[in-house]
Image (cartoon, rainbow, N blue to C red):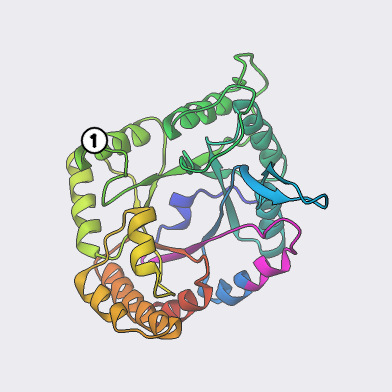
Amino acid sequence: MIKTTVTELIKGDKTAFSFEILPPLKGNSIEKVYKIIDKLREFDPKYINITTHQSENIYKEFPDGAIRKVNVRKRPGSVAIAAAIQNKYGITAIPHMICKGFSREETEYAMIDLNFLGIYNLLLLRGDAHKEGPKFEGTFNSYATDLQKQVADFNQGISADGSTFEKFETPFSYGMACYPEKHEEAPNLESDIFYAKMKQDQGAEYLVTQMFFDNEKYFSFVEKCRQTGITIPIIPGVKPIVTRDQLTVLPRIFRSEIPVELATDLLKCKTDDEAKAVGVEWGIQQCRDLVKRGVPSLHFYSLMASESVKRIAKEIY
């Protein structure tokens, strides 16, 4: 049973290592998840994040030839996969908890199950606001800070409906997200930092950044956060570029600016293999600088990039 918090896990003289995985698509084996972990476990990951995905509407062709809108959850199983990882590897597993697509009641049931399974660390997020989903019944958390309030209430033995219950022996600890280049809906960076401070004041134990490619933006953001009284660890999130189209896709979806030098090198690439090599080299230099300047941990977004993450980690750890 793992009760250690992330802030305890990343303490020490050496920069810690962690990464994020996706649950397999519906109908696929967990063995794909295990292969990624087996590839990266040699770098002593302090924890592994597991993403959570809401249902979405898609159009599907049926045997009668009709095309109908149906609701599907393409990647179910975050709770079960977190338990499987923690039990198989003894590595702290941290499932995402999101607002979008999950009622307060569903969130509460997930927390009950997680606590029974010995999983006590969470990452609280609002979730993707752009996916078209079905009309759900029930009450929902609109923002990550609302979800945060629900978790805090749960830790105190207050249910989603306001009734009380016997508190669980081990309460949840959790981190939340932050945005060195500003959340897309924030009017300015100062507003974003205001909400980051609110997350800390309401109980977040650490923050993990959205991916970025310019370290100066991260360190400038951290400095501004410290000036406003944010004292909790701010963990940099790193994503190696692995395909040529990410030069335009990542800025559009994640609002992450690509530095001129990196963009210039990617524009010269004729194949995705060339782009992946550029991404690895940039990631090595970026991570070396982050480690040299004393970040508490490096958190890798490993979607489609586990091999690149391994190549980078070999040069860093």
Q: Residue at x 26, y 51 (%)?
A: 181
Tell me how many marks there are: 1
Say whether residue 27 is magenta: yes
Q: Say which residue label 1 marks.
A: 191
Q: Where is residue 48? Give x, y as percent.
A: 55, 59
228 or 75, nearer to the observer: 75
169 or 77, nearer to the observer: 77
Q: Residue at x 46, y 74 (%)?
A: 309
Q: Where is residue 146? Give x, y as percent.
A: 46, 27
Say whether residue 31 is magenta: yes
Which quadrant of the figure has residue 225? top left
Q: Residue furthest front?
A: 65
- Kind of residue indicated by mark 1: Ser
Viewer can see residue 154: yes
**Location of the C terminus (image quadrant):** bottom left
Q: Where is residue 162? Give x, y as percent.
A: 59, 14
Q: Residue at x 72, y 55 (%)?
A: 26
Mark 1 nearby-residue class (10 Å; few <14, some 14–19, many ≥20):
few
Which quadrant of the figure has residue 246? bottom left
Q: Where is residue 73? Give x, y as percent.
A: 66, 46
Q: Residue at x 31, y 58 (%)?
A: 256
274 or 97, nearer to the observer: 274
Badge 1 marks a residue whose secondary structure is: helix
Looking at the image, residue 12 lies above or below residue 144 = below
Viewer can see residue 14: no
Q: Residue furthest top?
A: 163
Horizontally, residue 197 falls left or right of residue 30, namely left
Q: Specify the segment rendered in magenta.
A: 13-35
